[in-house]
Image: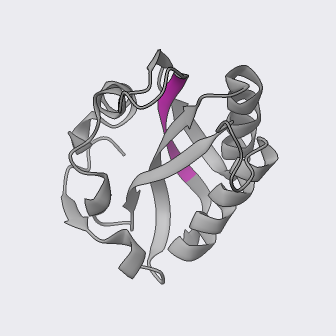
Amino acid sequence: MNAVVKSNVCDLSSQSHLIVSAFVVAMGSNSHAKRAFAIAECELTSLGELQMSAQTVGLDFTGRTDLVYHNACAMVSLNEPMVFTDLYWQLKDIERQCGRVQGGQGVPMDLDILAVFDGKVWQISQKRLPFKAHERAGLSEVASFLL
């Protein structure tokens, strides 16, 4: 997969019917991180072949809180291609399994799609650019071709 370097920046929200065969996701937690990462890793593995970066740990990069964040990136080559919208909702379900609730104080797991592979070209999420420092760190380990 890393040999594929063709990429395109786009608004992924307008790609709801895109067939995805692989994706890269940013993972973040500021509450119960050990448990949440274990659940998320298990669930992502059930979707396909998983490559995880090491976690980085640091303060809220926005500076708005004193919360400690655990961040990583993962690339998943799906067992079976799926429609982008189905993938999006699958990731929301994983967040809920990790304990995420609407309006909750902490964020046990946040999964943000950075890019998807349609079998020909990597589609990078325009709204995620420029990548944050912790995303670049994770991407350098699992999907450096996106940098």
Relative to 19, is 49 above or below?
Answer: above
Residue at 56 percent across and 75 percent down: it is 85
Q: Does 15 sit left or right of 127 as displayed?
A: right
Characterize the magenta stretch by its predominant secondary structure.
Answer: strand
Q: Magenta residues?
A: 69-77
The C terminus - image quarter: top left
What percent of the width, then of the height, locates residue 101?
75, 52
What percent of the width, then of the height, locates residue 7?
21, 58
| Colour style of the rendered protein structure | one colour
Q: Does 117 sit left or right of 93 as displayed?
A: left
Q: Return the residue nearer the eye: 87 or 128.
A: 128
Relative to 14, is 10 above or below?
Answer: above
Q: Does 39 sit left or right of 114 as displayed?
A: right
Instruction: Look at the image and say whether residue 48 sits in the magenta stretch.
Output: no
Relative to 64, is 43 above or below?
Answer: below
Quadrant of the image occupied by residue 61: top left
Q: Is residue 41 visible?
A: yes
Residue at 72 percent across and 50 percent down: it is 94
Residue at 38 percent across and 28 percent down: it is 138
What percent of the width, then of the height, locates residue 87?
59, 65
Relative to 45, is 102 above or below?
Answer: below
Q: Is residue 123 visible?
A: no
Instruction: Look at the image and say whether residue 75 sits in the magenta stretch.
Output: yes
Q: Return the residue nearer the eye: 108 or 92.
A: 108
